[in-house]
Amino acid sequence: MTAQPVLTEEDLAALMADAIDASWLDLRRRPLPAILDTDFVRTGLHYQLRNGIPPRSVRTAQRGSLRLFMEYDTLTETETRLPKFAGQLGVPVADLRRVLNEDWLPHVDVVNLPASLRQADPRALQVRDRDAGDFPAAALAALLSPCLLLTCNYKHFSALGVRTRSQAVDGVMAVAAINIGEMQVQAIVMIPAAPVMAAGAAVKWASDRFGPVAWVILGVLIGGGIYWYRKQPPQRREQVKQVAGEIGTHLLEEYGTAVNGVNRARVLLRASVVPRPEQRTPVSAILRELALTPESLSAQQLADLLDPSVRPSVADLRAFLRAHDTTVFDQVRRGGFVLGSHYQLPG
């Protein structure tokens, strides 16, 4: 039997198109939602005990590029499995509970979906038919998609586009690579402007102290540099041009390398996320918009952000938010809601 590729040519073409059109993702502006599954928590605890630091998924959430979510029943399942995890990892249960309470849960928003919302996406129902225990995480991931589903269980979650055991880790690493690459691009772009910016800042300071004459001095210095270059013999001018050209070529190469790295990471991230639903429902649109917004939103603010095709009236939206307060949403200020709540495991 011939092995089938993980991605078909059509899949790869779609991924490339989505990666080039990255309007669905801007980590500098909005965090990417990521949903935790129980088995991934166990893997992350093992990593933290071995390395002394939280896993990259938690560290990336601490830096603001990921926003971690967990369905309430998944959290409950995790708590009930802590004794088993403790036995496997050779540590007391209290140690695992402390790690979760101190390092993980402050960065995890827990959402308690009612049955009606869990059944909103047919992909989640396919996961339920394979394993009812994975249904809560699948339902939340489907509603918030595109998002990362942090799980190692590619068999049960295949309906949500999970193809490999390492897909979640690949996605988290891609987010980190995008952040690093974009910082490199920004740094390279800033290098040629740095002397001018530094000079401008210095002249502004001098201008505040000595008046407009400081800008005249800057003009004289720049003009003097041009005059000096023109007065150099042809051989010296050629050397100056050669050095400047080599520096410019190096910067362009570094810029190209950084941009290519970001683009490759975006392709990998697009291949790692749960795809968006074929048709966005109003409920999914509401939950996803709140998942992308760290600050609380009023019904009016949320309505303004929703696409008109899925936008309910402000009155209906406000009633929906209030009906699911303390379960799906948390009213952290009068009329201002966020998605999920923070929990601590009881000692």
Image (cartoon, grey):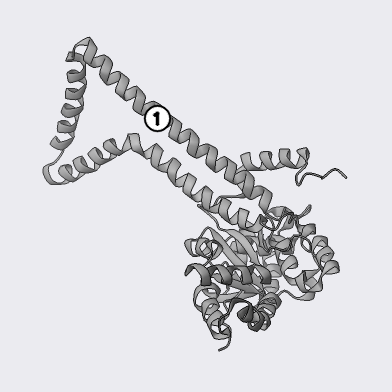
- Which is more toward the observer, 276 or 191? 191
Residue 273 in the figure: left or right of residue 55 = right
The number of numbered badges drawn on the structure is: 1
- Which is more toward the observer, 161 or 197? 161
Q: Where is residue 135 in the image (x, y as percent from the top left)?
A: 77, 70
What type is the residue that disc 1 sits on?
His
Instruction: Give me the residue at 30% from left, 39% from top.
Output: 194
Q: In this view, does 325 lie above or below 19?
A: below
For the C terminus, which image quadrant?
A: bottom right
Residue 83 in the figure: left or right of residue 30 = right
Instruction: Give me the residue at 49% from left, 77% from top.
Output: 102
Residue 49 in the figure: left or right of residue 138 = left
Q: Can residue 75 be seen in this view?
A: yes
Residue 3 in the figure: left or right of residue 58 = right
Q: In this view, does 1 lie above or below 149?
A: above
Instruction: Give me the residue at 24% from left, 43% from top.
Output: 201
- Which is more toward the observer, 46 or 292? 46
Which residue is identified by label 1?
250
